Structure formats: structure tokens, C-alpha cells
Image (tube, coloured by chain):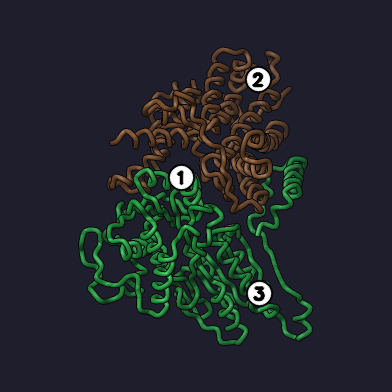
Chain colours: A brown, B green
């Protein structure tokens, strides 16, 4: 294979993996605190439409783009606030509420974006880092991306540090493992969970903006096309570890790129089969993880998805 | 076209209100309205003055009406028919109706509420349409892209391959690398027919041309369609087209500085410099004719398959980048298609492996075209079986 093609495949891998990574990092924090939010598709679409509308009216450069990204995060966070209120304050079922949030987001984003279908923006352009981007191969693969790629990696590093070395990180984990004990220790369980859910919403909203401002700079109904669900699988795949989420996101990205690239080489594998690769990989990893049941139990937050009523 | 865009604040406020209401009620029930029913009737009073009730015509759409794509083309036709027939008709449409049980309910509701002619515009509505049609023998139904008919159910489709052939000519004349890229959804006859016609059109004007095909295994994923387009650009394609529903491919072509050809509707808005032309479904004249037939009482169930000859297809306006000699060659071919002197699938035709599929001098039959499951020579990429 010629080096240019390899560089381009790896470049596209990172770009395809980035929205998955953003969602997965948000959901990872949310799940670490013991809350399972299945509303990613809905939150992502709201982020996508809010970011797009803002960029359309404020201009897609400089301050306009920054505001658009902030608004996209706010839209995702607002959606997740609704979810947090329902599940944390009213103690509704997390799975049902998350699914409802997805359906709600699908409809609401279509409605909000109705007048914006058919507009294309320039979108967020890649930053060619000086000098580094001129390196052969690596320059293209690592140093010619849009700012959100670097942001997602910085956020991953920050979260890895947060969970490993900070007291706040330990508190989040404690709340996710055993909210009763955490409360007995005097930790504010509900507040921690609210913040974790809001963080998850904001990151997912940003992932939505990545789709509507970087990946395909246009608004189209339901443009998340199932990426929220892949990101959910990715969190399980990563067994709730930040580093593995980064690797997993790029692995999923590579799989979906290879689905397209392999066809160019006339390799006689059914494209429908290739399209299922990311899911096959998830299943394979799940099987591996569960081969040692104790191992997988160590990774999943113990109280994940269980309602908790403070003071009881 | 974008009248609604001027009121973003109101729209956002409404959305905020919806969110707040859901929030305050603390209710986990999704407040989603997936099927909005809209009725448009010009001057009902006029109709009642003349003493004749307008013919109620219903439309069931699979997607949002939007600004491009399949559903958009049907809604434009609805508006065309409404404008042509004025207050003789009153149209209703229901958008984003899921195929299956949902659609049966919607079609039934339209029939029950006095619609005498109902257009159902997606393949998956075929069985629901027939089921409802049995219950309402006096209502006429027109199902698009299907093959099952009844006394009160007709089917209609367009010969989109004619448009594919002409746009293939444009691509074949505009390419510099002799390499075209085709983003395809699933290997069903309708898609395969389009790819073959496009290739034959391009070969007719450029014998060296090759067509690369990438299957994305989805009808709709703007991100993936764009990624597929970029993959082909990397492999040398400099004119792209697609058989998927989003403008992702046009968008990618615009960003990468190559040409693209749209499908379903004029997609030039998504690629001002990239978009050369598009194959456009033009259902307006057909809808008008069908409604007029019901008004006149001589509607009959038929399997309609129309093309340029009866205006069921059209080409989007050419981009300025398309030179005069290209335009005139395409226009001449279009005139020949209409006159019946040119058929896109004219023998001799061989498949990729060199097996003869059609003898010299004859045209492929409708039946063979409807079941097409082979690639013509000159296409790169496997046809999954």
C-alpha cells in the first residue's frame, strides 16, 4: 500500500473516531457516577442543531465558532438536565428515561432545525500545526486536525488524571460504586451525579457539533445516524477506562473507514458484513472480558443504573 | 424557500418552551410529534360557492419535506398539482411516517377522513396501502416504487436511469482523470440500474472512463457518505454521484474541489461550484393527471413507469462550469431519449466478466431492467451477491 493512502486512512480514522470519543468520555464519567444515560442520540442531535444554528447566525469563524460550540454543549447539557431531574430527583427508571430522551431529541432537533435544512457552512477548518504538520506521514496523521480532535485528546488526558490522582475523581467513583456508603461518609451523592450527568450531556452536545460543523458542515435530520449507540458500546468495550476509550474510539473509526477502503481494493467481502465490524469487535471484546467474570465485575461501576434515594 | 429561517428566535423559544414543559411536568413520556398533519386549502369558500366540494388528496411521506431529496421531490409535486388544479383539489400531507404499522394507521386515517385519492410514497408502504385499499374500495390509491396492484391501487415510478445516463455523459465529459465515483446504498436492482446507466452514459462520450463504486450499507448517514466520497477522491475520482438520501457527497466534493452530480432533487445549494447537474424526479405532471382523472371519473389502476418523454424526470440546471458543447450533447441525447431513438440499455452489452447480457441491436426489456443484478464492464468494485 502506498504511504499516502495509509496516512489518509489513519487521518480519517482519527476524524471518524473523534465524535465517538467525545460521547464516550462524557458517558464514561456519567456511568462512573452510577448513572446510565441512553439518551446520547437525542443529546447529540440537539448539540448538532444548536451548534449549526449558532454558527449560521454568528458566522463560522473565530468568536462565532466558539459560541456555537459552547451553545452546542449547553444544548446537550440542558437535555441531560431534563434526564437528571427525571431520574435523580424523581427516581424514574434510567433506561426508560434515557430512551425517551433519545426519541425526544430526534423529534425536537428536526423541529428546531426545520428552516436550516439545505444550508451548508464552511465549518471548522483543520489547524495545520506549524513545522509539525510538515513531517512526512506523521504530519498528516497527527498534526493536521481540527481543534476538536486535540480537545478530545486533552480531555481524555485530563479525565485519566482526574480519576487516578484527584480526590474529586475518587468521590465520583465512590458514588458510582456505593451511593449508600458515599452518603454515610457525608458525600453529596445527588450533586455529584447531577454534575456527572451534565458533563456527559455537554460532551455529547459537543460531539453533535462535531458532526454538523466539522464532519459534514450542514444540518440534516437524524445526522447522528446511530453514533450515540456505538459510543455506548464503546464505554463497555473500554471497560470504563479512559485510555481504552481512546484506543477503542480509533479502532471503531478504523473499522468504519476500512469498510469503505477495502472495497476500493476489490476485496470480495460483503460490504454489509464489513459494516457490522465495529459491532463484531464489541461482541468479541465482551466475550473476552466475561471469560473472567470477576475481572469484568471489577470494572463496571457496581451501582450502575440503580436508583438511589438520599436519606433512606 | 427558507421563509422559516427568518424566525430562529421564535423557533428556539418554542423549543425551549417544549423542553420546559416536559421538564416541569416531570414526565418521561417523549413529547415527539413524528407525524404532523398539515392541510392546505386555497379559498374553500370559492369551492362551496360553485357548489362542488374539492377533491381531497392525501400524501404519505417517509421523511421530512426538507429542502432536498426523495420526500422533497414529492412535496414539490403536491404543490405543483395544487397550483395547477386550484380549488378543485385540497391536499393533505403527513410527513416522517415510519414504514409498517404506523403507515397503515396514517393511510387508514386519510381514507376515513374523506380523502378520495391517496399517494403513498415509499416502498415499505406497499402492503399497508393494499390492506387499507381493501377496506375502502371507493378510494383510489397510488403507491410509488411498488409492484403490487389492485382495482383501486395503481403504482408509479420514474425511469431514473434515463437521467443517470445523461448525467453520466456530463460526468464522462467533465472528468480529467477518467475516474468517476459512485456512492451507493444497497445492491438492489434500482441502485444497480442507476450505476449501470451512469456508466454507459459516461462510456458513450468517453471510452476510457472507469466508475468506482463504494457501498455504504445505509440510505442515510451524511458522515459516512462523506467519508465514502473522500475515499474515492483519494483513489482518483474527480466527479462523484450518489444513490443515498443525504447531500453528504455533494458537500464532500465541494470541500475537496471536485465535481459532483446530485440525485432526487436539485442539490446545487450544497455545492455551489461542485454541483454540475442532477437527476430530478418530477412527479408534478403525473400527480396533476391522476387527480384530474379522479375528478373526471376515469381513473384506472395502472403500473406507470415514466421518464423524460412524459416529463416525469428532469435535469437540474447546469452549473456555469459545464461548457456549451457538453450541454448541447446532453440536450441532443435527451431529445433522442424522448423521441425513442436512444435507449440507455442498448445492445451489445457485456457484464464485468465479459459474458454477453444483451445482443447487438436490441434494447433491454423492462422486466430485465427491473431485476437487474449485474454490472456492466468498466465498473470497479464488486457487486455483492
State the CA–CA distance, disc 3 to disc 2: 67 Å
State the CA–CA distance, disc 2 to disc 1: 56 Å
In the rendered image, the vertical position of residue B298 relative to residue B148, given as above or below: below
Q: Earlier in the sequence, mark 3 or mark 1?
A: 3
What quarter of the picture does the N terminus of chain A occupy? top left
SS for dot 2: helix
Same subunit, labels 3 and 1: the answer reads yes
Which residue position is annotated with label 1? Answer: B256
What quarter of the picture does the C terminus of chain A occupy? top right
| Residue at mark 1: chain | B
Which residue position is annotated with label 2? Answer: A180
Which residue position is annotated with label 3? Answer: B83
Residue A307 vs residue B274: left or right? right
Q: Position of residue B314 (x, y in %)?
A: 49, 69
SS for dot 1: helix
Whether residue B221 can be seen here: no
Q: Please tell me which residue is depicted at 53% across the width and 19% down the height of the picture.
A: A160
Q: Position of residue A260 (x, y in %)?
A: 38, 44
How crowded pointer 2 is (Cα within 10 Å; few <14, some 14-19, many 20+) is rated as many
Residue B262 vs residue A269: left or right? right
State the CA–CA distance, disc 3 to disc 1: 40 Å
Residue A1 vs residue B115: left or right? left
Amino acid at each position: 500500500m502506498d504511504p499516502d493512502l495509509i496516512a489518509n486512512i489513519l487521518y480519517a480514522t482519527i476524524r471518524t473516531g473523534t465524535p465517538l470519543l467525545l460521547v464516550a468520555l462524557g458517558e464514561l464519567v456519567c456511568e462512573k457516577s452510577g448513572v446510565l444515560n441512553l439518551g446520547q442520540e437525542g443529546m447529540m442531535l440537539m448539540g448538532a442543531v444548536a451548534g449549526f444554528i449558532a454558527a449560521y447566525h454568528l458566522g463560522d469563524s473565530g468568536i462565532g465558532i466558539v459560541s456555537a460550540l459552547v451553545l452546542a454543549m449547553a444544548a446537550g447539557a440542558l437535555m441531560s438536565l431534563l434526564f437528571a431531574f427525571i431520574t435523580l430527583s424523581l427516581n424514574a427508571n434510567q433506561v426508560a428515561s434515557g430512551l425517551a430522551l433519545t426519541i425526544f431529541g430526534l423529534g425536537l432537533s428536526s423541529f428546531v432545525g426545520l428552516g436550516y435544512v439545505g444550508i451548508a457552512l464552511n465549518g471548522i477548518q483543520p489547524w495545520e500545526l506549524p513545522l509539525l504538520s510538515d513531517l512526512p506521514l506523521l504530519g498528516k496523521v497527527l498534526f493536521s486536525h481540527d481543534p476538536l480532535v486535540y480537545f478530545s485528546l486533552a480531555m481524555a488526558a485530563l479525565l485519566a488524571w482526574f480519576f487516578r490522582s484527584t480526590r474529586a475523581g475518587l468521590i465520583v467513583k465512590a458514588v458510582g460504586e456505593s451511593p449508600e456508603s458515599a452518603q454515610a461518609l457525608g458525600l453529596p451523592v445527588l450533586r455529584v451525579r447531577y454534575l456527572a450527568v451534565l458533563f456527559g450531556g455537554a460532551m455529547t452536545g459537543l460531539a453533535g457539533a462535531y458532526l454538523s460543523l466539522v464532519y459534514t458542515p450542514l444540518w440534516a435530520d437524524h445526522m447522528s445516524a446511530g453514533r450515540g449507540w456505538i459510543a455506548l458500546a464503546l464505554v463497555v468495550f473500554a471497560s470504563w477506562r479512559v485510555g481504552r476509550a481512546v484506543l477503542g474510539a480509533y479502532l471503531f473509526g478504523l473499522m468504519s473507514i476500512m469498510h469503505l477502503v477495502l472495497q476500493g481494493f476489490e476485496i470480495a467481502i460483503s460490504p454489509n458484513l464489513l459494516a457490522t465490524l465495529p459491532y463484531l469487535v464489541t461482541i468479541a471484546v465482551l466475550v473476552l472480558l466475561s471469560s473472567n467474570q470477576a475481572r469484568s465485575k471489577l470494572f463496571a461501576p457496581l451501582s450502575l443504573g440503580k436508583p438511589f434515594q438520599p436519606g433512606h | 424557500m427558507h421563509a422559516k429561517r427568518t424566525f430562529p428566535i421564535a423557533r428556539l423559544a418554542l423549543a425551549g418552551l417544549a423542553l420546559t414543559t416536559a421538564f416541569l411536568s416531570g414526565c418521561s413520556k417523549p413529547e415527539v410529534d413524528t407525524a404532523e398533519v398539515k392541510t392546505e386549502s386555497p379559498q374553500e369558500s370559492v369551492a362551496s360557492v360553485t357548489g362542488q366540494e374539492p377533491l381531497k388528496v392525501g400524501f404519505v411521506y417517509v421523511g421530512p419535506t426538507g429542502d432536498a431529496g426523495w420526500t422533497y421531490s414529492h412535496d414539490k409535486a403536491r404543490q405543483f398539482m395544487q397550483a395547477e388544479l386550484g380549488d378543485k383539489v385540497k391536499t393533505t400531507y403527513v410527513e416522517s411516517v415510519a414504514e409498517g404499522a404506523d403507515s397503515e394507521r396514517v393511510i387508514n386515517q386519510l381514507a376515513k377522513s374523506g380523502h378520495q385519492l391517496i399517494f403513498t410514497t415509499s416502498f415499505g408502504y406497499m402492503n399497508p396501502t393494499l390492506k387499507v385499499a381493501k377496506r375502502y374500495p371507493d378510494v383510489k390509491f397510488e403507491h410509488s416504487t411498488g409492484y403490487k396492484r389492485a382495482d383501486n391501487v395503481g403504482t408509479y415510478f420514474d425511469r431514473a436511469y434515463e437521467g443517470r445516463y445523461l448525467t453520466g455523459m456530463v460526468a464522462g465529459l467533465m472528468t480529467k482523470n477518467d475516474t468517476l465515483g459512485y456512492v451507493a446504498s444497497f445492491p438492489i436492482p434500482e441502485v444497480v440500474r442507476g450505476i449501470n446507466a451512469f456508466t454507459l452514459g459516461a462510456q458513450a462520450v468517453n471510452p476510457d472512463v472507469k466508475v468506482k463504486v463504494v457501498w455504504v450499507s445505509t440510505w442515510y448517514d451524511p458522515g459516512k457518505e462523506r467519508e465514502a466520497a473522500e475515499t474515492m477522491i483519494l483513489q482518483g475520482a474527480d466527479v462523484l454521484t450518489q444513490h443515498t438520501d443525504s447531500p453528504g457527497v455533494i458537500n464532500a466534493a465541494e470541500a475537496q474541489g471536485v465535481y459532483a452530480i446530485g440525485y432526487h432533487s436539485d442539490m446545487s445549494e450544497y455545492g455551489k461550484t461542485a454541483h454540475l447537474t442532477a437527476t430530478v424526479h418530477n412527479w408534478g405532471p403525473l400527480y396533476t393527471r391522476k387527480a384530474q382523472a379522479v375528478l373526471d371519473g376515469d381513473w384506472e389502476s395502472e403500473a406507470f413507469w415514466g421518464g423524460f418523454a412524459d416529463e416525469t424526470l428532469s435535469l437540474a440546471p447546469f452549473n456555469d462550469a459545464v461548457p456549451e458543447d457538453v450541454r448541447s450533447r446532453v440536450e441532443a441525447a435527451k431529445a433522442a431519449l424522448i423521441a425513442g431513438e436512444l435507449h440507455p440499455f442498448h445492445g451489445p452489452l457485456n457484464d464485468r466478466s465479459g459474458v454477453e447480457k444483451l445482443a447487438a441491436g436490441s434494447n433491454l426489456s423492462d422486466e430485465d431492467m427491473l431485476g437487474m443484478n449485474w454490472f456492466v464492464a468498466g465498473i470497479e468494485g464488486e457487486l455483492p451477491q
